[in-house]
């Protein structure tokens, strides 16, 4: 399901990857079930314990698909834009957990140029 979502072929939790990329800041701040599918990791989510986690097979599928990788990059750019306007001011709020998940996911897929600066 993660592959299909990131490829833009299937929705997850009622939205598509393109809905997430095009979402406004209010939606991003108030919606709590998109980070897990937009930025999957090996670790289960505390917020959505039933959310799918990455497997080595899924990683290979996603990495071999240009659309998936482009959508990961686009979603990461969208979140960078969000956090530029809405910086994390409190330690350990939900945005800190989101940022950690985003960086772990991007590292898994080798997209590190967005957060190394």
Image: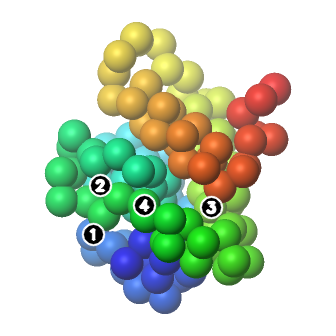
- Measured as percent of width and height from the top left, residue 45 is found at 27, 46
- Pair 4/3: label in front: 4
Residue furthest left in the image: 49
- Structural crowding at the residue carrying mark 1, measured as other residues with C-alpha within 10 Å and reported as few (<14), some (14–19) or many (≥20): few
The one nearer the camera, 97 or 78, is: 97
- Pair 3/1: label in front: 3
Q: Which mark is residue 72?
A: 3
The residue carrying mark 2 is: 33
**Dot 4 and dot 1 residues touching (CB under 8 Å):** no
Kind of element beneath mark 4: loop
- Pair 4/2: label in front: 4
Answer with mark 3 or mark 2, whichever residue precedes in sequence.
2
Image: 5 above or below 76:
below
Kind of element beneath mark 2: loop
- C-alpha span from label 4 to label 3: 14 Å
Residue furthest front in the image: 56
**Dot 2 and dot 1 residues touching (CB under 8 Å):** yes
Residue at the image point whose x is 21% and y is 43% from the top: 47
Q: Which mark is residue 13?
A: 1
The residue carrying mark 4 is: 54
């Amino acid at each position: 399901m993660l592959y299909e979502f990131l490829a833009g072929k299937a929705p997850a939790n009622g939205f598509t990857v393109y809905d997430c990329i095009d979402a406004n800041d209010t939606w991003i701040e108030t919606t709590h079930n998109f980070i897990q599918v937009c930025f999957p990791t090996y670790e289960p989510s505390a917020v959505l314990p039933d959310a799918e986690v990455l497997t080595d097979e899924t990683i290979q599928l996603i990495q071999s698909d240009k659309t998936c990788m482009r959508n990961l990059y686009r979603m990461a750019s969208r979140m960078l834009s969000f956090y530029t306007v809405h910086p994390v001011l409190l330690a350990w709020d939900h945005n800190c957990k989101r940022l950690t998940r985003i960086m772990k996911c991007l590292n898994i897929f080798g997209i590190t140029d967005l957060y190394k600066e």
